[in-house]
Amino acid sequence: VTVLAVVLLIGAGHGVLRIAVGDLPHRLLGVVPTAGLSVLCGAVAIAEVTTLAGVLGLPTRLWPIVAPAVLVLCVAGLLPTLGYRHLLPARAGRWLGIDRAAVGRPTAGPQSARRTSARTADLPVFVLVTALGAVLLTGGRHWAVRSIDEWAIWATRGRGLSLAGHLDPRIFDGVAANYQHLDYPLLVPSLIAWSDGVQGRADDPAAHVLLILQLLAMLGVLGWTLTSLVGPVVGVVGVLLAAGTPDLLARWGTLLAADATLVAFAVALLGLLALWLQTERPGLLPVAAILGGGTATTKVEGLLFTLCLFVAAGVAVGRAAGQYRRLIAAGVVALLADAPWLLWTARHHLHSDQINSTTLAPDHLRGVLRFAGIATAQTIHFWPGHGWAFTATAVLAAAAALAIGTGRRPVLFLAMSAAFCTLGLWAQYVISAGAGVDFATGAIGLRGHFASSAPRVLMVPAILVMLLLPLSAGLILRGPSRRQRLREMARTER
Amino acid sequence: VRGAQRTLAAVVLTASLVVGLVTTDRAVRAQHAANATVAGAQRVNGRLALLGRREAFIDFVSGIVPPHAAIRIVQPPAKHPVATSAGSGPGAAGVCGHSVDSAVYWLVVYELSPRPSVCDLAGAWTVYFGVQVPDQAGAHRYSTTLGVLAP
């Protein structure tokens, strides 16, 4: 039954992906990215449908709304190609960078040969991620909910969606007791509810499998983007570095909580945007918009990461006006994915306990500035990378790649993304510090806040920084691209 | 210069491959160790026996309280409630997570899902978890300090 839940999720994701790219995704992107992106897009689809049903006061159980929507998406992914191109309005396609005319066009000649070669290059990443999946999913039948964040937030809300069958105000509004973090969005609870619904009962191991799959999908997508950007060696190194992030697989990856899933969506989004910046390949930006939606609807920090990644892409894109327009459209679509939930929480006065009208008041901000030093020291202390020597080398490699001018866009984008995400989280910690207390009490509170959350939320910027190393080194090793060499020759001739 | 750059890049890339291999291997081993620990842990009705001998009490409550009925959980007030306690919410100390051992409170809330936890007595089943169960009509006693009182 778990396999059925997974197959339907992938089927729905494939349907979403097909609508987004305007073609059969495996034909346009390859098998490995299609599999990975289908898992991630399927999760977003299930979360969006469940959230929409919930905020509209409709049932969140499997059969009334969610399963029919998933089945429709599965069918959409399997429709014959002929006639499919007309599903997407031409104007919307132009805005989102989908080449509608290319839909259904037979692939032949050098382009087809290049794609075949790209698919062969994806093989090492495929083998690695499959091996990791086999190892990680072994023993999955024993998984159980075992931490306070699962009991207090994520799994309890998932069970609320699947067993109560609606957004019960006593659980999701906190009207009768003080439930925790009521402002957190519903992607992970929706996946738990989906798993329960297909199983026909609450089933922790099955829900764990769906969340682990998000991580594996991210590793596949990351490996594919790095392989496409530089080559298979860099793809494999990137997957290994991300998978080896301290505590990601062994701790956060085995909980029914949102931290590992947030990493999955944010890192996959990063890969997609980096590849789009370098290749401008049609179809990538709409998929990035969906992954951005997934990032924003996983956790509150996800909204920050989505914003940071799209702004960083805007910085890296340079002066290309058409690309700006498409990037802004994709960013807006990504942020809009969280709109139903944000509107519902605003209507029910469920505010973040960290970023709200009180903590953003000028007086509060002036009061918490004194904690900036402690926040900086704590960020450094809890940074979950592979050590400071590795981080310093990554920064140096990125600086070298930028100075040499090879692959400037993806390296600049990755560096900016890491910087913005780190700065954003640092600001969130500072802003949420206690303003109206004496310094010693506020410092104790802030250190406690860091200790309980920083090793989890800093994983995203830490992975972005560590990926700078293989990407930059790989680009330097590969040397300037053909386009860059031609530009250089033209400049020399002039 | 380009040759030196490329040599350095190759060295750095190889080093990061080694770091990736070592850290991924470490992560996979740690995950297996965690799985083994969970697999070997004592269970009650499929759940980890995280509440110790009181874990079977959850099944006792589930057998009495209807699946969608509200529950009011009463626990002994903790001397040092942790930060995640529902301390600032409604309810008296010891009731609905207010100033109690919050880990135990949230575990009970989760294991009794989807029964919503409430602070108000009206219409709710009261779950006594570690405090004296009153001797009155409608009380279902599991032990002297574990029991359920019908609304």
Image (spheres, coloured by chain):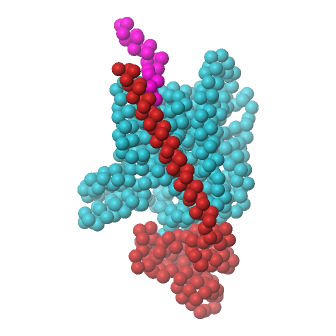
Chain colours: A cyan, B red
> Where in the figure is residue A371, as x and y percent of width and height?
28, 56
- Quadrant of residue A488 in the image? top left
| Residue interval drawn in magenta | A474-494
Q: Is residue B15 left or right of residue A110?
A: left
> Where in the figure is residue B9, as x and y percent of width and height?
41, 29
Does residue A488 appear in this view? yes
Magenta stretch: includes residue A485: yes
Tell me the residue at 40%/11% (across/down): A489
Tell me the residue at 63%/63% (across/down): B39
- Quadrant of residue B16 in the image? top left
Q: What predominant SS class does the magenta segment belong to?
A: helix
> Where in the figure is residue B138, as x and y percent of width and height?
64, 88
Tell me the residue at 35%/34% (across/down): A396
Tell me the residue at 68%/49% (across/down): A6
Residue toward you, A141 or A51: A141
- Quadrant of residue A125 in the image? top right
Magenta stretch: includes residue A325: no
